[in-house]
Image (cartoon, rainbow, N blue to C red):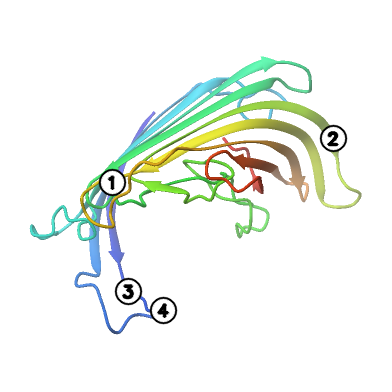
Amino acid sequence: SLTLSGGLAWEHRELLDKQLDRSTLYHFQRPDTRFTDLRATFGYSTARTFGYQMGGAAGTSLVVRARHKAQMAVPDSLSGQPGLDGSLDEVLAQLRAFHSLGGRGYASHVLALRASGGAAGGPGADAGHFEVGGSSGSTESVTGLALFGGSPVFFPVRGYPTVTRLGRYAWSASGEYRFPLAVINAGPGTWPIQVDRVMGDVFVDAGNAWGPEVGIQGYQNPRRSALASAGAELVTGILAFWAVPMDVRVGAAVPLVEGDGAVVYVRLGLSF
């Protein structure tokens, strides 16, 4: 499928002091900015799941998004200047693949692969455009307030903070071996929780981000060594209040580059 979208956006910027109040000493000469934002998204998927399976079990999916953001009414003297012209071009892509391996248990063992990449250019694409690191998740829907569960991460590398690598070029990849453990189908007494299935997985992650590499003092962001990690997760499918299904994921990841030991985390939903 191919989706095209576009629109106008308004941005207002203010400088704050140490108390996070509006600064009375400094201000932007042009605090209000208008942008045009055009996007094209292409998606293709043959990914599917089977009975009792948690997550994808076979097939592939691909998503590619191109974006053109242009700042309107930029003076010629400021056009193309980093920090003054917010125009940018961006391309993002993500490929997921699942292969069923059969095996013992209530569902098939699955080899799951994911690869993400992105590139951005233009004066509005600075060294913090993409973020690499962290563990992806989804926010809870029980309270409607999104209190916990994590958030989607496009370039995850588990075991690291989400901003361990920054840049206008980025990539990350993951490989997981997923296997079924148990079907419980019971709850703890009168508590409003029904425990359904339990799945385990072992994984390896890698990723990096860098750029731009320009000759402006303090603006360089050269490529450094790629991040890498390995670990394992336990995923439990539950039914909260007998109506809201959730997959609770508890994991431990060991950073293999620039790491300080194992990191334990809790997220909602599968990693991908």
Q: Residues within 10 Å of mark 3 (few under 14, many from 20)?
A: some
177 relative to 240 in the view: left or right: left
Question: Which mark is drawn over residue 212?
Answer: 1
Quick one: label 2 or label 1, which is nearer the N terminus?
2
Instruction: Say what secondary structure mark 2 lies in.
Output: strand
Q: Nearer the viewer, mark 2 or mark 1?
A: 1
Query: Residue 207 versus residue 107: which sits nearer the camera?
Result: 207
The Cα–Cα distance between marks 2 and 4, rounded to whole angstroms, is 53 Å
Task: Farthest residue to the right: give it.
Answer: 189
**Badge 2 or badge 4: first in the primary sequence:** 4
Quarter of the image for residue 85 reads: bottom left
Who's the residue at 48% across and 26% down the image? 61
Q: Nearer the viewer, residue 255 or 184?
A: 255
Bin the neighbour count of mark 2 within 10 Å (Cα to Cα): few under 14, some 14-19, many 20 and up. Answer: some
Looking at this view, name the residue that lies furthest to the top: 102
Up the image or down, 74 lies above or below 125; here it is below
Q: Where does the N terminus fall, quadrant-wise?
A: top left
Name the element at disc 3: loop
Q: Give the CA distance from mark 4 to mark 3.
A: 10 Å
Q: Which residue is mark 2?
A: 184
Q: Amino acid at mark 3?
A: Leu
Badges 1 and 4: C-beta atoms under 8 Å apart? no
Residue 184 sits in quarter? top right
